[in-house]
Image: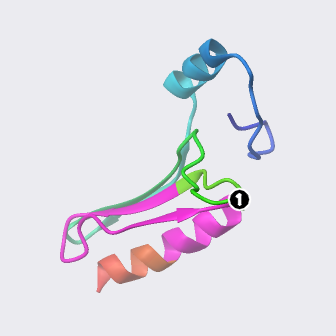
Amino acid sequence: MLGVDGRPVGVDDVEVWRQWMQTAARTVAVDATPDGRVSTVFLGLDHGWDDGAPVLWETMIFGGSCDGWQWRHRSVEDARAGHAIALELARR
């Protein structure tokens, strides 16, 4: 889950998490491109496979020559920066 400040908050109750995931505004950014869109969202589950900080955000390009490209991020700041880079790539 995300707290009111946009930072991840752990939760022990899977039902609380499930309800939050269904109703929360998890989109960090979404922008149109000539052939589709770039989307960055909060994933809600750690997609990291190491002992580092949790990987909780994902940027993806939909459409065009970069269709399906994705990056995952460890902070919302990195997610915003990654979104900007992906948007630049997708608009080329």
Residue at mark 1: 51
Q: Please, which residue is most extreme toward the right here?
A: 5
- Vertical order, 62 against 33 (above or below): above
Q: Please, which residue is most extreme toward the top here?
A: 15
Q: Residue at x 69, y 65 (%)?
A: 77
> Which quarter of the figure has residue 86?
bottom left
User: Quick one: 8 or 91, which is closer to the camera?
Assistant: 8
Q: Residue at x 54, y 27 (%)?
A: 21
**Three-letter residue code for mark 1:** Asp
Query: For the C terminus, which image quadrant?
Result: bottom left
Magenta region includes residue 69: yes
- Vertical order, 23 against 82 (above or below): above
> Which quarter of the figure has residue 51?
bottom right
User: Quick one: 75 or 13, which is closer to the camera?
Assistant: 13
> Which quarter of the figure has residue 66?
bottom left
Looking at the image, residue 30 sits to the left or right of residue 52; the answer is left
Q: Where does the image place residue 85, in percent across and percent down from the top left?
A: 48, 79
- Vertical order, 25 against 22 (above or below): below
Looking at the image, residue 69 sits to the left or right of residue 54; the answer is left
Task: Tell me the magenta residue range.
Answer: 58-84
Exactly how many numbered labels are in the figure? 1
Q: Residue at x 66, y 61 (%)?
A: 74
Could you tell me which secondary element the residue under label 1 belongs to? loop
Magenta region includes residue 37: no
Looking at the image, residue 28 sits to the left or right of residue 87; the answer is right
Looking at the image, residue 18 sits to the left or right of residue 16; the answer is left
Q: Where does the image place residue 35, in percent across and percent down from the top left?
A: 19, 68
- Vertical order, 11 against 46 (above or below): above
10 Å neighbourhood of mark 1: few (<14), some, or many (≥20)? Answer: few
Query: For the N terminus, which image quadrant?
Result: top right
